[in-house]
Image (spheres, rainbow, N blue to C red):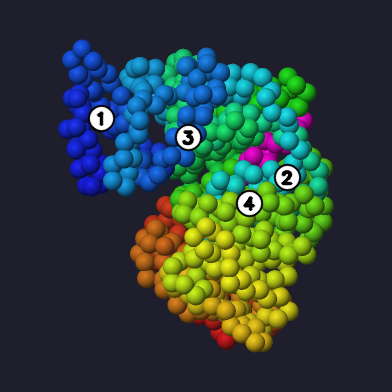
Amino acid sequence: MVELPEEVQSAYERWCEAQSWETTFVEWLPGGRSGAKLAVVRQFQKNVINRQVILKFLPGELQRELDRISQALCESPIDFRDEHLMRVIDDPVVLGSWQMITLSVAGGDLSSIRPLAELAHDSRLSAACVAVTKQVLSAWNPEAEHRPEAMTAAEYIGMLLADRPDRLERVREWAPTGKDIPDGPFATLPNPLAFLEGHFSGSKRIPVQRGRAHGDLNVRNILLAPDTPERFWLIDFGDYAPDAPLARDPAHLLLSMAVEWLRGTTEKSRQRDALMTAILTPEKAIAGPHTEVSAVLRGAGQAHAQKNGFGREWEQQSLLSIVGCALMFAGRKLPHDLRRWFFDLAAHAARDYVKVSGDSKDPDVPAEGSMWKVPRQRADIATLALRQLTSAQQRTWNHERLVSVVLKLLGEDEQFVRLAPCRVRRKAYGSAVLVVSNNRIHAAELDDSFQPFDVWAVTHDEIEDVRLRPGIRADVVIVTRSAELVAGGLLQKQAEQMVEEVKRLIGNRSSSEGWCDLVRELRTATFDSTTAAHLAAETESLRMALDRERQPYPDDPADVDLLIQQLRFTLDDGTRILASDSHVYAARTAADLIRGRLLDKLA
């Protein structure tokens, strides 16, 4: 077993030696995106054990996943549980910084069971998708145990992304920031991030169908017999919830299949455009396997909802689920052109939702029901805080305790905007918290029982300046007329977001600041790489700077915008996956010339 880190391998070998049975390694199985390793082993003890099982090795803490798995096994209908959920055998085993769980072999026969991903280009795929979707929606939820919950579009998408704050953070690092994004030379689409904040959609509330759901249903979490797809098993259901939105699983499954279909296609190919049409409007798409799979998945969900008269609402929830799930995939560790494709898919789905639902409004005004406007209720604060904390911070500081601190700090006239763990007087990171509201900034030390003390508060009107001291652990410096507060030890990204938010609230962000950032990137950028992949990595920061929204440049704005578009197009062309070395050379030479002309304009 050579695929495990050395310390984990040693701990595993010691564990095997301590058991009363013999363990024989058989083979490795493909793992998932979580970094988990899957091994098939045989365990034998005369007259006691003779079995073949799967050992799943995971980095980090398993308790949340195990709790969700246990909950799913306890709450699911008996027939569905026995026929479709892979069982956990024995207790988890700690192996250094990793943990190991033992799983039963799906169907008792590894030779006939395959991940759904292996059918990505197989004629049996659509039948398999129908079989799985029908059972997940209907057999897993034979009765309506949860009242439909009325939610706005922004609330619904916010709920989908609440458990994936890291994905959304990664999207915000490179995605355009305006309310619109281009759709060809003459049209625009809603920016999905603006849609998430309540722009474009109105206050219409949809009755969201809820029930048992996997939470991460994808082509690698479904094992089945290809010729008899009714025999399938769900694995990795550590994101299970008993009251999840039911439209999410089919949408997430379809987009996970899209990842498989996109492999091997080029960035601006017709196949990608056709796939987007097949996902959003299969009835208008060219006939083919992608269209068929999209149509049968949508049809299975529609049939489930129509039984209770919710067919129209299901169509709207399906489009919103594509918006939310596409943003999740845009935040995954995929090639940049695929992440951008999913971002554009989210934009098209947002536009289609507005058309289908008639739920539209002035895009410059956030929706009344938006969970992304500054909230006051505990549940809303908890949801927003969850998105602002990294996974590690959520584990170290239970975010519910931080929400309690926020509520103690905010006055009756304040609404929550942003928080970050930090340090003020003590040296320990996380010994204090910085909280921004719509009219004040608070900093407070936290004692061992997580109670705030030595509270410092200042209104926005009193702030003269706010600035960032960058570093692996960055500082936020807030200067008032009479004092200076240094909140230290923040994560760099959180510190940047905090400074930007405060500047926006106090209204002193310089109109030239965005252009200064671009000039710095242009001056430091190099174009020395000889391959498309290396050029993409070398110019990623510059391409992100080119995409950011800025106020119009005061001198020759049309010429400046044209040069920016030319440079962006040239870099995109040179970083295509299939670009030849000579093509890369031509692109970087042209980019260097355009960069010089642009710097002359911005001088």
Residue 317 counted in the magenta span:
yes
Mostly what secondary structure, the magenta segment? helix
Mark before the other along the chain sequence, 2 or 4: 2
Q: CA distance from mark 1 to mark 4?
A: 44 Å
Mark 3: secondary structure: helix
Mark before the other along the chain sequence, 4 or 3: 3
Amino acid type at circle 3 is: Asp
Q: Over which residues does the magenta segment extend?
A: 312-324
Query: Mark 1 or 4, which is nearer the eye?
Result: 4
Residue 394 lies, with reference to residue 101, above or below; the image says below
Q: CA distance from mark 1 to mark 2?
A: 46 Å
Mark before the other along the chain sequence, 3 or 1: 1
Q: CA distance from mark 3 to mark 1?
A: 28 Å
Residue at 67% from the left image edge and 80% from the top image edge:
463
Residue at 44% from the left image edge and 34% from the top image edge:
66
Mark before the other along the chain sequence, 3 or 2: 3
Q: Circle 3 is placed at which residue position?
A: 67
Proximity of marks 1 and 2: CB atoms separated by less than 8 Å: no
Q: Circle 2 is placed at which residue position?
A: 153
Crowding around mark 3 (Cα neighbors within 10 Å: few <14, some 14 to 19, many 20+) is some
Residue at 41% from the left image edge and 24% from the top image edge:
87
Amino acid type at circle 4 is: Ala
Residue 412 counted in the magenta span:
no
Amino acid type at circle 2 is: Ala
Query: Mark 2 or 4, which is nearer the eye?
Result: 4
Q: CA distance from mark 4 to mark 3?
A: 21 Å
